[in-house]
Image (tube, rainbow, N blue to C red):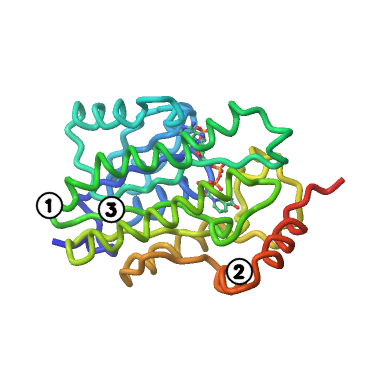
Amino acid sequence: MALDLNNLTGRTALITGASSGIGRQFAHEFARRGCDLVLTARSRGRLTELADELRHTHGVTALVLPHDLGRPGATADLADKLTTHQVTVDILVNNAGFGAHGDLVDTPPERLEAMTALNVDAVVGLTSRLLPGMVERKAGAVINLASTAAFQPVPHMAVYGATKAFVLSFSRALWAETKGSGVAVLALSPGATDTEFFQVADEDAAVGPRRSTAQVVGTALRALAQGRPSVVDGRRNALMAWVSPRSPERLVIGVAERTVRPAR
Ligand SMILES: NC(=O)c1ccc[n+]([C@@H]2O[C@H](COP(=O)([O-])OP(=O)(O)OC[C@H]3O[C@@H](n4cnc5c(N)ncnc54)[C@H](OP(=O)(O)O)[C@@H]3O)[C@@H](O)[C@H]2O)c1
């Protein structure tokens, strides 16, 4: 039976990057709908605090499984832990991710490799481990965090933009593969959102007004209910994401370069 997003009692959502920002907001929204939770990120303390709050406020169960998902083998380890705890995941939110602001030539290769490991490999690893069960049960949802950075190249954040283009392409393809199965796959593309992302990315460029995590998650849940393959949060962001792929290549790259250029 397909998921009823208004009443998720008895369902379980696994949220990566739940310790902060958009992931934390997803945890609140799902708990409010009665959904049990598995929360993961690296920060055990922040996850434990959130789990306590959600149990107390909403009466849901909240399992904390701290993991560095950028480590090789991390998603297999996490899947094993789910089996040990006898958890069936109905909703997977591949949200953990980070960016790094700066030119490729100035960025340590290890930081870029850690980014592709988390933003790409962990998304593939968890999805490929959890989606088959959802399809077999004919119910489930996968929400993957792409970005408005997915719709054009992003000079000064080249690897980040490419990871998000991967997530968008991957999710749209899986949407088609699972169509009619009772499982929904959605790529969620926020623009600038008020989280710790910019601090982590060392991003000081003027990328426009930031939207709230509540707005972003609200957009995702509406799009999921409508069975859409992807959604961009915010009208201005959606317009830019529509225009960019339809505009001349050099113009698009030039505008993106000026927008993301480091303030000196
Ligand atoms: N904020 C924006 O403007 C924006 C726009 C478009 C897309 N996004 C995307 O939205 C997603 C969520 O980002 P956010 O804005 O909410 O940023 P955030 O506040 O920095 O949250 C990132 C989350 O990822 C977790 N994380 C980072 N490295 C990890 C690792 N190696 N293993 C496991 N978890 C890890 C962090 O927790 P720990 O540090 O505890 O591990 C944190 O919970 C990301 O995929 C991001 O690319 C953000």
Residue 137 placed where, x, y %? Answer: 12, 52
**Labels in figure, total:** 3
Q: Quadrant of residue 125?
A: top left
Q: Nearer the viewer, residue 236 or 73?
A: 73
User: Mark 2 packing: few (<14 Cα in 10 Å), some, or many (20+)?
Assistant: some
Against 202, residue 183 (above or below) is: below
Mark 2 vs mark 1, CA separation in Å:
38 Å
User: Mark 1 packing: few (<14 Cα in 10 Å), some, or many (20+)?
Assistant: some
Q: Which mark is residue 163?
A: none
Residue 8 placed where, x, y %? Answer: 25, 56
The amino acid beneath tag 1 is: Arg
Mark 3 vs mark 2, CA separation in Å:
39 Å
Q: Earlier in the sequence, mark 3 or mark 2?
A: 3
Mark 1, mark 3: which one is toward the viewer?
1
The local secondary structure at tag 3 comes to: loop
Residue occupied by mark 2 = 244
Mark 1 vs mark 3, CA separation in Å:
20 Å
Residue occupied by mark 1 = 137
The local secondary structure at tag 2 comes to: helix
The amino acid beneath tag 3 is: Gly
**Residue found at x 71% / y 67%:** 251
Residue 177 placed where, x, y %? Answer: 24, 59
**Residue found at x 66% / y 45%:** 198
Q: Earlier in the sequence, mark 1 or mark 3?
A: 3
Q: Is mark 1 within 8 Å of ligand 1?
A: no
Against 261, residue 64 (above or below) is: above
Q: Which mark is residue 34?
A: 3
Mark 2, mark 1: which one is toward the viewer?
2
